[in-house]
Amino acid sequence: MERRVKRVIVQKYGGTSVESVSNIKGIARKVALEKAGGQDLVIVVSAMGDTTDELMKLADHITTRHHKRDLDMLLSTGEQVTVALLCMALREEGVAATGLTGWQAGISTTTDHGGASILSIAPERIQGELKMGNVVVVAGFQGITGDGDISTLGRGGSDTTAAALATKLGAERCEIYTDVEGVYTSDPRYIKNAVMISSLTYEEMLTMARRGAGVLHPKAIEHAMPHNVPLVVRSSMSRVGGTWIHGSPGKGVSHPVCGVVFHKGRFCYTLSPIQNRMEIKRLISSRLTLWGMEYDTLIEEGGDTLAFLVAEDDLERADSIFDRAGAIVRRDRKATVTVVAKDKKTCPVIRDKVRQILQENRIAFHTIENCTNHVTTVVEESHAIDLASLLHSAFGLDEVQAFEAAGIY
Amino acid sequence: MERRVKRVIVQKYGGTSVESVSNIKGIARKVALEKAGGQDLVIVVSAMGDTTDELMKLADHITTRHHKRDLDMLLSTGEQVTVALLCMALREEGVAATGLTGWQAGISTTTDHGGASILSIAPERIQGELKMGNVVVVAGFQGITGDGDISTLGRGGSDTTAAALATKLGAERCEIYTDVEGVYTSDPRYIKNAVMISSLTYEEMLTMARRGAGVLHPKAIEHAMPHNVPLVVRSSMSRVGGTWIHGSPGKGVSHPVCGVVFHKGRFCYTLSPIQNRMEIKRLISSRLTLWGMEYDTLIEEGGDTLAFLVAEDDLERADSIFDRAGAIVRRDRKATVTVVAKDKKTCPVIRDKVRQILQENRIAFHTIENCTNHVTTVVEESHAIDLASLLHSAFGLDEVQAFEAAGIY
């Protein structure tokens, strides 16, 4: 009965692909075809459509001050439902399937309920099911803490589950099925000339994701990168397109700029005037890091102020940190616009060109320290899309037709 | 921090008490009061209102031939949602609560998905939480198999969970909160003179439950009985009433008959004419037992036929067993009406009286073998309620005002 396990493919389905029972049946048909082709498959799924919202509504009827352990127990049921339904649909297609929750899949996490990180994966159950020839369906977004409690991984959690499983299982690749055809040079909802990118390195994608490309969570890339597991982002509705994310640059013609991404809802904390500038900077930076928050330090023209930029989601925690900083603080809503480069050597040239465009268009801006493969500027939120559009044109991305069309796939 | 655990009370809430968020808040207020009174509490909950039906509908959209492992994974989410919401509501009342799924509560079951039996309970997690002063909220109806799969216990599963936990924890008592005020002498929806019973022995209740009193599942009684854990069945809406079920007869005035219960939807398989009568009887009986089905053997007047009675839920399995019996089989829908006696010595007198009433009212009937504390007759389904009503009057139950009012509580 036991058979040799080939290199597995991990696939993740979220968004509209799991919004209804008929879409779940669609996934089952697709998976059945691939299974019939001899492929070993692990499928990671998200909660159906508005399930998570519906569960949150129930919780909100009781209290809006949610205890995070309770909330994780509640929300984790959403993915479990999708797992069970997809297994039923697979069986209807004649495919033997075993559904697993996060804890059954051996996914151990930190105790940081609502935003836990995967610590380790015990792959024995999944490997055993694969050996028996079963498709394994795993609930994304969830795991188990050392105390035996159910945890959830926060936003993008199912992507992270898929990438972490792919890494642990030594998968051939990890396919992230989503509502868009791949990763674009900019957000196609706002920048009409944005085009799909066929190939990116982990570092490029990590910067794209951290700086605003919402299509893939940075944590997923961080799991895949050290073990060189290729990630593919593509639409569940179409076989064309798709963006490959891997360790080495693609073989196609490479453009010096990957894309222009932006983040609205960034909050700028300005401390001024302050003494012991470097000391306070060090103190606040370490606290922000301690709380697991990504932040930026701004370079101010004057010199006697200190400014930090944090995401909207981290506002409450950031407030408590800055309240204790002992300097006068101003908090302003801003946006970041980032040009992601293929090579960090081109960054100074890119920076000069960005500044030139900002000045030509009379857009006030701040600069962020410590850029490696990207140039980020901080502007008023109302200027973000205009600036992104200007930069998208200025760096020649409007003209790119099939960006790196000669990529791997 | 650690404190001594007093004898705990296990409470189970189902039906209307968990049908809405506001009802769940009501349970939380009640539990908070009892906790404030110093009581250690373990609360077992069912799925909210129509959650199970809604989940079944989703599953039915995919297939009606459900794989039972998948179905258990799906349905078990219902109780998990209630657990999370009740914990949130308890915190709002200022009560520290820890919610546990079946597997977190250490409930190990057989692998008989959809109708699993509890094999053992590892109580350490629950005991640890109680020691820390927390109310423990446990998902009823579910457990974990030896393979690490989620199982469900079938109908009445939450009652069974509560009774099994009460037994394992050496609880002071197990309170089953339901939509009715207690156990009645007959079904009050059909028999208008039915009255609530204040006290019953395990054996009496077991017969009442097996023969049609839907208020408590026989499995729950089977768990409590060997360890003498008192069960209390009462309404979550009112503090009055309630039926105590325990090892020794109550102290109050005892009526010779406990109640008249009935079961519609019983199916009678008649094999005739057959040779090797006893051999076939033995064979079929052993198969029915092997499949975990409760059945009755009927005494036929003639003598060359053989008849078995099984429940509607077991119809599919029974069909497959009788198909292989090799005799001509007729299947008729029937009903049973059972008089439950306090003392098996009175059974012959009760049997004579039942027969007299059947004959006076010209009701055709069969008799069931092997009665101990009860007399059961099999009649056409259309006669069941009339006969129950006649027997309820004939055995003086109509006149009982406060049956065993001087009971324990």
Image (cartoon, coloured by chain):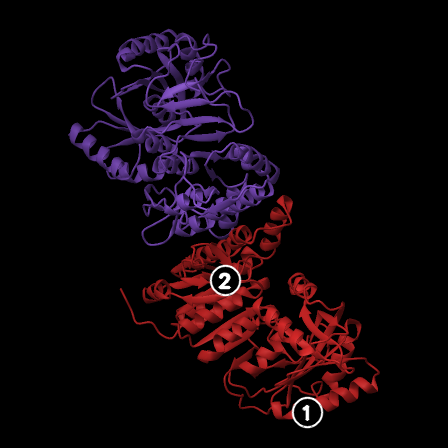
Chain colours: A purple, B red
- Estimate the x, y position of residue B208 in percent, counting from the top left: 62, 78
* Residue sitting at x 16%, y 28%: A278
Q: Chain of mark 1?
A: B
Q: Which mark is residue B223?
A: none
Q: Chain of mark 2?
A: B
Name the kind of residue labelled 2 in the image.
Answer: Gly
- Callout 2: SS: loop
The answer to whether residue B407 of the structure is visible from this angle is: yes
For label 1, count other residues whose C-alpha is less than 10 Å away and answer few (under 14), some (14-19) or many (20+). Answer: few
Q: Which mark is residue B348?
A: 1
For label 2, count other residues whose C-alpha is less than 10 Å away and answer few (under 14), some (14-19) or many (20+). Answer: many
- Estimate the x, y position of residue A159 in percent, counting from the top left: 42, 34
- Estimate the x, y position of residue A171 in percent, counting from the top left: 38, 33
Q: Which mark is residue B140?
A: 2
Q: Of all residues shown, which one is farthest toward the front? A: B275
Q: Foreground: A157 or A4? A: A4
Total labels: the figure holds 2
The answer to whether residue A65 of the structure is visible from this angle is: no
* Residue sitting at x 72%, y 83%: B392
- Estimate the x, y position of residue A95 in percent, counting from the top left: 55, 41
Question: Quadrant of the rendered structure where residue A300 is?
Answer: top left
- Callout 1: SS: helix
User: Contact (CB < 8 A) between labels 1 and 2?
Assistant: no
Whether callout 1 and callout 2 share a subunit is answered yes
- Mark 1 vs mark 2: which is more N-terminal? 2
Q: Is residue A180 above or below residue B203?
A: above
Q: Is residue A250 above or below residue B162?
A: above
Q: Nearer the viewer, mark 1 or mark 2?
A: 1
Q: Foreground: B322 or B403? A: B322
